[in-house]
Amino acid sequence: MTPKEALVFAESLIDDPGASEAACRGAAEWAYYAVYHLVCDHFRVDPAKNYDQAKHDAIRLRLRSLDVATSSPELRAARTVFERLWRLRVRAHYHIDDVFSGDDAEDAVEHAKGVFVRIQPAVSPPEISIEMPTESAEQEVISCPPSATERPARP
């Protein structure tokens, strides 16, 4: 699952205006985790392999100390909304006696979407042309389109 897919799932949980409170809580959770994993990807931290570097407090601290002048637009946006998303996720998970409304869920999803709309499209590498000799001594040109990946590989 990619961070973007997590956000799409969060949105789907509250597509129905009559979404249950459980669905609203789930939407806030997935909206937070969509941004969390996007940020981890940018910091080249894999929570599954090195959780010490990917602990939520460590990511929050790293975002707070981010140099906004040299950061990507999506990281600047994540820095702005991450605390809000984190608080909403904590409320959704741990304050189960408190009401968690559709407005709360929409707040989380909209904040997460604000991060994702700032992602700069990757610049596609130019097509590569390979000249292949043929039997008739003419040359055949084969074009190879650039590979399209949704998510960069982690080191």
Image (cartoon, grey):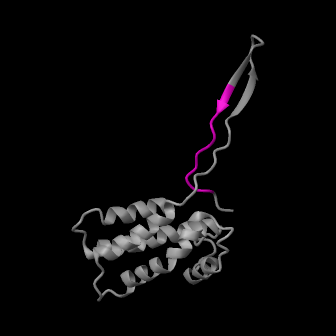
Asked whether residue 109 appears in the rendered view, the answer is: yes
Q: Which residues are magenta?
A: 142-152
Residue 47 higher or lower than 138, as above or below:
below
- Above or below, comparing residue 18 to residue 54 in the picture: above
Image quadrant where one finds the C terminus = bottom right
Residue name at image x 53 percent, y 75 percent:
80
Query: Picture coordinates of residue 75 (x, y %)?
Result: 59, 68
Residue at the image point whose x is 61% and y is 69% from the top: 46
Q: Is residue 1 visible?
A: no
Name the foreground residue: 67 vs 15.
Answer: 67
Magenta portion: prevailing SS class: loop
Task: Tell me the quarter of the picture where residue 96 sits.
Answer: bottom left
* Relative side of 151 to 102, left or right: right
Q: How many marks?
A: 0
Q: Quadrant of residue 67?
A: bottom right
Q: Is residue 99 magenta?
A: no
**Residue 44 percent coordinates (x, y):** 65, 67
The answer to which of 66 and 148 lies nearer the viewer is: 66
Point out residue 122 in the picture as x, y percentages from the top left corner.
61, 51
Which quadrant of the structure image shows residue 74? Answer: bottom right
Residue 20, given in percent of the width and then of the height, sits at: 25, 72
Looking at the picture, does residue 130 appear above or below residue 7? above
